[in-house]
């Protein structure tokens, strides 16, 4: 029997970029838009459906429904809204991007976004800017453009992500280095662990525990609380559980086969390059403690 090909989706960054371009084109007179074509960060282009566009007193707001394809992404079906308006008496050609309700704010160092800024990562931020510029060029207009991204129920969705533990509060992050979502991506899993390690390092933590099974988490906690915890004050645990991340993931039926590497901060790069790749090959899931 032929293997079913998993359907790819698009990122929150692509959704925000598509909405921003659609809202701008709406302001230029395009009232019947059902989809827009946007640039991808890795090259190429993608056509994204637009759910609806509404006129506002000083601009327009477009809503795009995030489609994660066959990936078990908690932001699947989230309503990403992009509000666009022209700001008078400002320098023409500039594009200002900000986060609204449902987009988190960064409160801890170590992330790609500075503390105090909305959690819109640099790559999707540039993607939004390029999409808006395309809209300006297509419409033959110019001016200072303000773009505000918000997410319906973003704060509620964010509780199912690592954002609260990473110090991103009030909503989800606008992400996407590729612009598309590859289902059950090992790369995405490694990126999640890497950013957690970056925040731990920036926070001055000296010990990180990586565990590949739920029982290993309990063992890690037992070991760390016997002495290491007193030295470091806090431990970042990336653990396996019932939520499947890897395509081969499964619950081990209560059998504890996980190993627990515990490493110092100076070994973080080695762990990221070696141990994490090994973890990606085992039956891995994710449990947020």
Image (tube, helix red, strand yellow):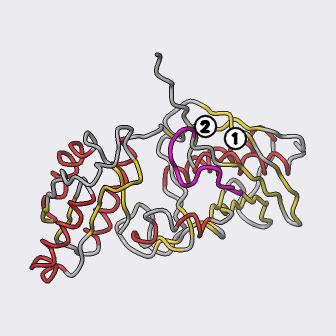
Is label 1 or label 2 in front?
A: 2
- Is 50 displayed left or right of 15 in the figure? right
The dot on residue 134 is: 1
Q: Which residue lies at the image location 40% right of the left edge and 48% below the top edge?
A: 244
Q: Main secondary structure of the magenta part?
A: loop
Residue at the spot 83% in from the left edge and 61% down from the top edge: 59
| Alpha carbon distance from label 1 to label 2 | 9 Å
Question: Where does the magenta region start and end?
Answer: 69-81
Q: Which comes sooner in the sequence, label 1 or label 2?
A: 2
Quick check: is 188 in the magenta stretch?
Answer: no
Badge 1 element: helix
Q: Are marks 1 and 2 in contact (CB under 8 Å)?
A: yes
Compared to residue 32, the image places residue 115 above or below, namely: below
277 or 285: nearer the viewer: 285
Residue at numbered disc 2: 39
Nearer to me, 279 or 242: 242
> Could you tell me residue 111's position as x and y percent?
39, 64
- Is residue 72 located in the magenta-colored stretch of the structure? yes
């Amino acid at each position: 029997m032929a293997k079913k090909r998993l359907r790819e989706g698009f990122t929150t960054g692509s959704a925000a970029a598509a909405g921003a371009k659609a809202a701008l084109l709406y302001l230029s007179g395009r009232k019947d838009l059902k989809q827009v074509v946007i640039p991808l960060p890795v090259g190429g282009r993608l056509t994204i459906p637009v759910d609806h566009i509404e006129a506002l007193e000083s601009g327009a707001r477009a809503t795009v429904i995030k489609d994660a394809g066959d990936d078990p992404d908690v932001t699947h079906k989230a309503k990403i809204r992009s509000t666009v308006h022209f700001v008078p008496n400002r320098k023409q050609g500039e594009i200002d991007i900000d986060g609204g309700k449902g987009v988190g704010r960064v409160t801890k160092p170590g992330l790609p976004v500075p503390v105090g800024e909305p959690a819109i990562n640099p790559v999707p931020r540039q993607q939004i800017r390029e999409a808006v510029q395309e809209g300006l060029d297509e419409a033959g207009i110019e001016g200072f453009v303000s773009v505000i991204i918000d997410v319906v129920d973003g704060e509620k969705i964010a509780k199912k992500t690592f954002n609260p533990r990473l110090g991103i509060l009030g909503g989800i992050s606008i992400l996407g280095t590729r612009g598309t979502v590859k289902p059950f991506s090992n790369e995405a899993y490694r990126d999640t662990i890497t950013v957690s390690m970056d925040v731990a390092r920036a926070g001055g933590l000296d010990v990180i525990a990586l565990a590949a099974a739920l029982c290993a988490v309990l063992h890690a906690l037992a070991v760390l609380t016997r002495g290491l915890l007193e030295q470091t004050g806090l431990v970042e645990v990336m653990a396996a559980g019932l939520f499947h991340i890897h395509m081969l993931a499964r619950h081990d039926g209560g059998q504890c086969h996980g190993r627990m590497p515990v490493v110092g901060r100076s070994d973080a790069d080695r762990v990221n390059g070696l141990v994490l790749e090994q973890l990606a090959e085992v039956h891995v899931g994710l449990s947020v403690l």
